[in-house]
Image (tube, coloured by chain):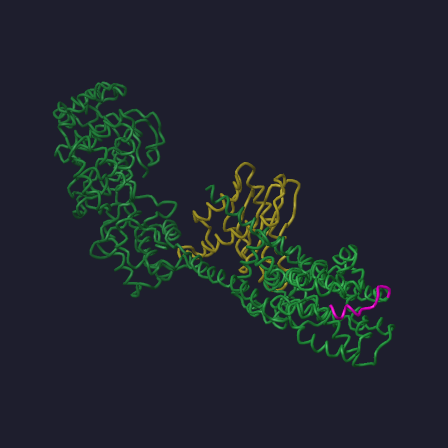
Chain colours: A green, B yellow
Amino acid sequence: MEGLTLSDAEQKYYSDLFSYCDIESTKKVVVNGRVLELFRAAQLPNDVVLQIMELCGATRLGYFGRSQFYIALKLVAVAQSGFPLRVESINTVKDLPLPRFVASKNEQESRHATSYSSDSENQGSYSGVIPPPPGRGQVKKGPGSHDAVQPRPAADQQEPASPVVSPQQSPPTSPHTWRKHNRHPSGGNSERPLAGPGPFWSPFGDTQSGSSAGDAVWSGQSPPPPQENWVSFADTPPTSTLLTMHPASVQDQTTVRTVASATTANEIRRQSSSYDDPWKITDEQRQYYVNQFKTIQPDLNGFIPGSAAKEFFTKSKLPILELSHIWELSDFDKDGALTLDEFCAAFHLVVARKNGYDLPEKLPESLMPKLIDLEDSADVGDQPGEVGYSGSPAEAPPSKSPSMPSLNQTWPELNQSSEDTAIVHPVPIRMTPSKIHMQEMELKRTSSDHTNPTSPLLVKTSDLSEENKINSSVKFPSGNTVADGYSSSDSFPSDPEQIGSNVTRQRSHSGTSPDNTAPPPPPPRPQPSHSRSSSLDMNRTFAVTTGQQQTGAVAHPPAVPPRPQPSQAPGPSVHRPVDADGLITHTSTSPQQIPEQPNFADFSQFEVFAASNVTEEQDGEAEKHPEVLPTEKASDPATSLRIAQADGKIEEKTAASVPANVSKGTTPLAPPPKPVRRRLKSEDELRPDVDEHTQKTGVLAAVLASQPSIPRSVGKDKKAIQASIRRNKETNTVLARLNSELQQQLKDVLEERISLEVQLEQLRPFSHL
Amino acid sequence: MAVCIAVIAKENYPLYIRSTPTENELKFHYMVHTSLDVVDEKISAMGKALVDQRELYLGLLYPTEDYKVYGYVTNSKVKFVMVVDSSNTALRDNEIRSMFRKLHNSYTDVMCNPFYNPGDRIQSRAFENMVTSMMIQVC
């Protein structure tokens, strides 16, 4: 039953009636007989009276607590007004006239016009009793008359402990008080766990019998334990036959008695404690439930299967529909079996229903299996076994949480590993299509490591792996492993990693991935790394070479119009030192050109070098080459480029005799792959080591000093251009493939997003419910 | 948003049918009944085992001038039929799918209840609440 809201007049009236009926001055419960008389005086048919008593909960309790009494009075008013007697009507029917009791009060007599009931005797008895109440009756006079307040306090003083006083004196809290107090009856009142299922069930039959006015009912029940219940404001002695559920309220009651001024505070406290929960399970009840559970399932941590539970609860003789509803409420994890918690909740609900309480629509909090530690009531200690069940319904969420931290951990690991490996490992690169792609990836990785720790590569590879595109995912991780032995790539195929990479992807998608995935093409060029190393190079080279190479640089303009390859856009800066070394004297145009055409710069250097090789003695070159070769491992990109070219040249030289210029012209074409490869490779190697720049620059300077004039380099540029064109085309194909893959990833992500949005909409109505 | 929701048992008798009471409910009952033929047709057309969820969702069964009827069948040949108002800003397919998913989940919960005998009418309050939420729908 829901709480009862009473107007001021109603409260006064009811409290007076309560006092009137409370001939024993218990202040908590009214004598049943007196109440019955009162109800009969209300001139309602007997069955209505019975119904009222059942509705208000007195039948459950076997007595009339204050709240029951008030509810009963309200129901009398409802019935007298002709409304159907329902629990909801207590609050829903507005402007209800006060219940009329024949001859109960003088004022009532004047109010009601109906004739007397047959209880003339009662009237007599009432009239005898009336005198005391009239004092209060006057109080109850008119709804609006507050002069009653004075006799009220008088009456209150007569019942100093009457909690009614305080609400009257503090109207704002009173409605709450009543409401809450009345909630107690509305809450569940479970049957005390009696000795066994036998006696346990039998009282149910009694309560449901609906026998005459309550006497049979009340007599049929064994004395209840101390009443702690209800209306916690009443310290009624244990007269009720049914179990109560509020152990804490007893103390509150005593405190309430004390001081009227303190009653409000006590009311509040009472409210809080009594508000706690009509559905709370007391220790005894719980013990009883546990014992019952054991009879079905000896293992307290085990489950009761649905069929066994069905049989057990069918014994309660509740209708199947209600049992079905109880099951729905109590089977929290919807697994068709009952854990100890769920069983206790179900049992409690059955008991409550047996006692006449309506089943709630939702499982009350105190009955919920303890998934997470939200239990804060006194029953925490009572339910030690719940901790063990905490995982049962919440298996899904907790399982996710452990997985998430692991994912989170993996993600940074990937980053670190990639970064470390990127810097440290040299990357063998072969110019095969897949390898080109790998190179791109590696380059991106290396570059991104510098630029962005959240490595678009990681994102990309993770995306690929997640999307179960085995081809691509295998390719990249394998490529990665082959290429640089990134540990991250090893982890990709594993599921947790994939999930983790899912996380990373999601994270990256949230903010940075679009940026990361979109621009991969630009960064893939090795040049970003070049730029970094180039900056170092520049510092060193400029510092070192300015003096040395100027002469040589002056001697050579070879340079070339560095025609930039797209993949080497950043390269110019790299090559600048290179050019600067040998071509410091170049006009401003060349340095400007250099940024645009780094590759050509390479080739120009290469050609120059080749020319220089040609011009120089082969021995000298050979000497230089070996010299250069060992140093090739160094980090200097520019120099290594030339060295690479020199290597190519060396190979050329070894293969054939000193080539003519024509052959020199051709040579650049032949080895382009190798130099490129070397160059790319060297980029990774370049960074770590810078010390050898000076050596290389010195070598280069010497080499450049002997380089041919510009015209020859120009002639070779065409071939260089063609080579660069070829390279660009290769890069294009690689990038195109990347693009298509990324597009696919994008589509998948969008699909995911849509599904998430759908889920969100799905959940939205529930939030409104 | 759904105007009528029905749960049909394997033997093609209704386990649960509910429609917004604004219109003549009988009309909706007829629509559901006729849609059963379409459902059977789709099921037989599919042939293979209905494992994938996509196959559980049958999609638009047939449209009328005012309504559209969507179908969904479970692995145990229990059918869910949903009638939506055409005038409703066209619900996305995903939304219909999610609604069917919810229906299916609630139906499963009902089935799990040991007090529910398969073949009985569905009287679960939780199920009804869920259906109500779908019929009144997003605010």
> Which region of the structure is painted magenta?
A701-711
Question: Percent position (x, y) of residue A256?
Answer: 18, 36
Along the horizontal axis of the image, is A298 left or right of A617?
left
Q: Nearer the viewer, residue A493 or A29?
A: A493
Q: Is residue A710 magenta?
A: yes
* Residue located at (31% from left, 29% from top): A78
Q: Is residue A445 above or below residue B106?
A: below
* Residue A478 x %, y %: 62, 71
| In the foreground, A529 or A361 | A529
Percent position (x, y) of residue A764? 50, 44
* Quarter the N terminus of chain A occupies: top left
Q: Is residue A392 above or below residue A111?
A: below
Observer able to see residue A432: no
In the displayed structure, would residue A6 be above or below residue A485? above
Percent across and percent down for residue A206 are: 23, 47
Residue A740 part of the magenta-drawn span: no
Observer able to see residue A301: yes
**Where is A753 relative to A547, above or below?**
above
Label total for image:
0
> Residue A361 falls in which quadrant of the image?
top left
Q: Is residue B139 left or right of residue A387?
A: right
Is residue A672 shown left or right of residue A254?
Answer: right
Q: Quadrant of residue A6?
A: top left
Considering depth in this image, is A65 or A638 the residue closer to the camera? A638
A389 relative position to A709: left or right: left
